[in-house]
Amino acid sequence: MKMMSPAAKTMLPAVAMTVVSMVLTLAVVVMWLGESMPWQVAVVVGLGLDGGWLATLAYERRLAAQGDHSTPVTAVGWCFGVVATGVLVAHALGEDSPGAWLAVSWLPIAAKALWLVHGLWERTALTGEALDAIQGIQQEARDEAAVARARLRAEAATEETRLTAVTQAGSRVARVQAETAKALSGAWSTLEKARQGEETGRALTSVTAPVTPGVTPRWELPVWGPTQAVGPLALETAPALTDEALDLLVDQIRHSESPALSYREMASRFRAAGHSASETRLRAAWKRVVAA
């Protein structure tokens, strides 16, 4: 069984309603005018009204097939439709029960409207190849949009996972740093208490007094912070200082400020001034200067 074409789906209802409207118009004209004139004349009048409507409709269809349009012809066709509707309404109003006739009096106008819809469909109709191409383009656009949405969701989930991992790692690092700082602070506090205690001074005095009588060494806390890298070998490129010259330099640097500098401060200024001496000789010179 052959399927109905898309054009027939809009044309057949318009044709059917046009035929019904013409039959009703002819019947009403014959019944209405048959009382005052021969029925043959009434039939001619009815056929003339329907013929004029059919002629204008046929001409409109011919222009539409050629891709053209005529406003006067369209206006004449609508006039015939309005006249046919007017005849049906006038006949209905003259009847004892006008409801049935009024119910079908709109058919001529409805037939013209269906032909208008059919004409609009013809002006916008596309071939099967064009419709397939449009459907393919739309499907491709939907596919691309779906892929883009999936990619964005995946990237968002990956970024969320990465941020979570980084945040957790940063939290662990901060926690370890806090615990380390707390432990170092406790150790530093313990060293400071031991340094300031009287027992520590007496213990150091009892240890160092036999070696250097009358000297109570100062216990320096270890440096907690950045330190300077020490070269691989501390070779003395300048001529080695004698013990007397070394003692004189150590004494001058030690008493360059008041109160006297500690060994660490003196050693730092000694090397900053460009002097060179091994740590053993420098510490021996410091002991000799302090004991003098």
Image (cartoon, rainbow, N blue to C red):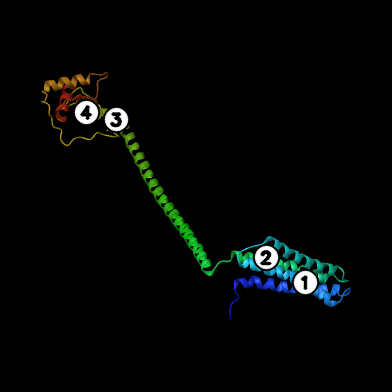
Q: Nearer the viewer, mark 2 or mark 4?
A: 2
Q: Which residue is mark 4?
A: 206
Which comes before the other along the chain, label 2 or label 4? Answer: 2
SS class, disc 2: helix
SS class, disc 3: helix
Residue 231 screen position, x and y as percent: 18, 35
In the image, residue 177 above or below residue 197: below
- Which mark is on residue 195? 3
Which comes before the other along the chain, label 1 or label 2? Answer: 1
Image point (81%, 71%), residue name:
101
Is disc 1 in contact with disc 2, using a CB cutoff of under 8 Å? Answer: no
Q: Disc 1 and disc 4: Cα gap in Å?
A: 145 Å
Q: Which residue is mark 2?
A: 116
Q: Disc 2 and disc 3: Cα gap in Å?
A: 108 Å
Is disc 1 in contact with disc 3, using a CB cutoff of under 8 Å? Answer: no
Q: Quadrant of residue 274?
A: top left
Which comes before the other along the chain, label 1 or label 3? Answer: 1
Q: Which residue is mark 1?
A: 48
Q: Disc 2 and disc 4: Cα gap in Å?
A: 123 Å
**How many residues crowd mark 2 within 10 Å: few (<14), some (14–19), many (20+)?**
some
Foreground residue among 56 and 183: 56
Which comes before the other along the chain, label 2 or label 3? Answer: 2
- Which mark is on residue 126? none
**How many residues crowd mark 1 within 10 Å: few (<14), some (14–19), many (20+)?**
few
Q: Disc 1 and disc 2: Cα gap in Å?
A: 23 Å
In the image, residue 183 above or below residue 52: above
Q: Label 2 amino acid?
A: Leu
Q: Label 4 amino acid?
A: Ser
Which comes before the other along the chain, label 4 or label 3? Answer: 3
**How many residues crowd mark 4 within 10 Å: few (<14), some (14–19), many (20+)?**
few
